[in-house]
Image (cartoon, helix red, strand yellow):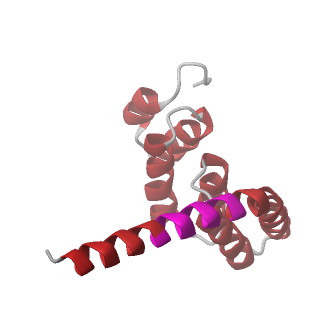
Amino acid sequence: MGRWRRIVVAVGAAAALFVALFSKANAQTQRPEARQALLHSAADALARGDAATALRGYEFAAALEHAADIELGIVRSLMLAGHYRRALTFAAHTAQAHPGAPDGARMYAQLLDVGGHGALAARVRPADAAA
């Protein structure tokens, strides 16, 4: 690799690092307010029975942060819309991807139980959850 090419690559990498760090810092200062506003409006839509609006709100919030509470909102929205298979799949993801948040495993176990898979639900259900 020639000298100039190494310089261009190094400058490009430094610029990309600067942009990534600046963007992350900027997003972290704005994220909590945007996240809370999206979750609030999505929860309101869910309470009104508007599954499509709720799902959009939770999906926008998921674009800001990968979190169990957001994913459970997506699961509830999918259930309200009648997309039970997708809801079960997403609940399984939530239970696996967020082991520190037992609500995901509880929701997954409930959906398994309702679907007639009680033995599997019992294995998945967190220890502190009632059967």
- Residue 21: x percent and y percent? 57, 60
State whether the magenta stretch is mostly helix, strand or loop: helix
In-front residue for pair 105/79: 105
Q: Quadrant of residue 19?
A: bottom right
Residue 27 sits above or below residue 114 on the image: below
In-front residue for pair 76/13: 13
Residue at screen point 63% across, 52% down: 72
Residue at screen point 45% across, 63% down: 85
- Residue 106: x percent and y percent? 57, 36
Residue 102 sits above or below residue 16 on the image: above
Residue 87 relative to residue 81: left or right: left
Residue 53 sits above or below residue 71 on the image: below
Residue at screen point 31% across, 74% down: 7
Q: Is residue 79 visible?
A: no
In-front residue for pair 118/50: 50
Residue 53 sits above or below residue 18 on the image: below
- Residue 90: x percent and y percent? 48, 57
Residue at screen point 86% across, 65% down: 44
Which residues are the magenta region?
15-26
Residue furthest to the left: 1
Q: Is residue 112 visible?
A: yes
Pick the quarter of the image with the N terminus: bottom left
Residue 99 painted magenta: no
Residue 17 painted magenta: yes
Pick the quarter of the image with the C terminus: top right
